Amino acid sequence: MGMKISVLYLGHMAFPKFRLVETPDEQEMVKSPAVAILIQHPTLGNLLYDTGNSPEHLTAYTREMLHDYPVVDCISIKDALAAKGLTPHDIDRIIISHLHFDHAGGLKDFVGTKAIRHVLVSEADLKEAYFKVMTGHGGAYIRSLFDVEGVGFETINETTDLAPDLTLFIQAAHTPGVIGMILRTEHSGTIITTSDTLYTADSYQKELPPGGTINATTDEFFENLRRIQAMEKEYNATLLFGHDYDQIIQWSEKGWID
């Protein structure tokens, strides 16, 4: 048997769309899902890509984050795994696309497990996260969420094959190092995850740069966009975006994808 994946919907945030992508309508609202991807691999075991928001968001998040990106509902990664018949102890390794609060928020559920000793992140993002929280400008990085008891970070800084059918690549957009995945499935073709370098299908198709204050310029967005366009063509791939509500709901309802 080959690799199979399952998209886990972990609740969503709701806020004005201009905080997500550039838009002239300041009143339009958007639902922004939190998501994790569970990977069951024949040689690597159970892998988890991202962990969603913290169930303790009301006390753990900064006032700014709660105002700008309020969590409407939160499904903990522990509960999402339970729905698949698993516990945090069943996960062998965690991959965090980047250490922002809505991707690393569930790491505490893995304290005391083997997975917390094997948390794979990009070196550039890890450095950025610690630099920002230690200089008082954490923003979307919240130290208590990722600097948890027993955490062992493993870093990459270039394209890395974990297995012939699972490749990680680094994107220097949104943060200095966002991990995307190339998943070569047996029956569903190649799937490329973009995480937050491309939030939605709409932002990809219409080439809408991120809104808010995440990026100082849009240069990195467009450079990464061209790269993803080329990869989509090269691999004849399906793209899975970071915060596309309709896509995440649809994919989460598919169950296992192989």
Image: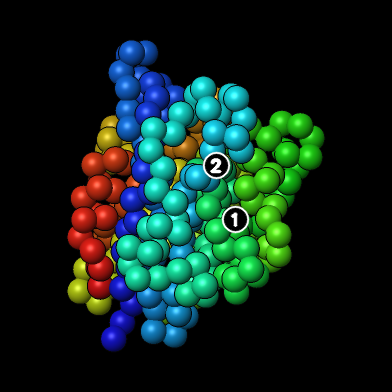
Amino acid at the residue labelled 2: Glu
Give me the residue at 29% from left, 48% from top: 248
In this view, the residue in front, 234 or 171, is 171
Q: How many marks?
A: 2
Is 41 left or right of 191, judged from the image as shown? right
Front residue of 196/248: it is 248
Pointer 2 residue: 56
Measured from the top left, where is residue 20 in percent x and y?
42, 29
Task: Indicate the quadrant where residue 113 lies.
Answer: bottom right
Question: In x, y percent, where is residue 136?
Answer: 76, 32
Residue at the farthest right position:
135
**Pointer 2: residues within 10 angstroms few (<14), some, or many (20+)?**
few
Contact check, label 2 and label 1, Cβ < 8 Å: yes
Q: Is residue 152 visible?
A: yes
Cα gap from disc 2 to disc 1, whole angstroms: 10 Å
* Image vertical order of residue 231 relative to residue 14, above or below: below
Q: Is residue 181 left or right of residue 108?
A: left
Residue displayed at 68% across by 35% down: 138
The circle on residue 11 is none
Q: At 21% across and 56% down in the image, what residue appears?
A: 253
**Is 30 located above or below residue 186 in the figure?**
above
Frontmost residue, 32 versus 97: 32
Q: Secondary structure at mark 2?
A: loop
Q: Residue at x 38, y 64 (%)?
A: 82
| Quarter of the figure with the C terminus | bottom left
Q: Earlier in the sequence, mark 2 or mark 1?
A: 2
**Res 173 visible:** no
Percent across and percent down for residue 41 are 39, 78
Q: Which structural element holds mark 1? A: helix
Amino acid bearing label 1: Lys
Give the numbered dot on residue 108.
1
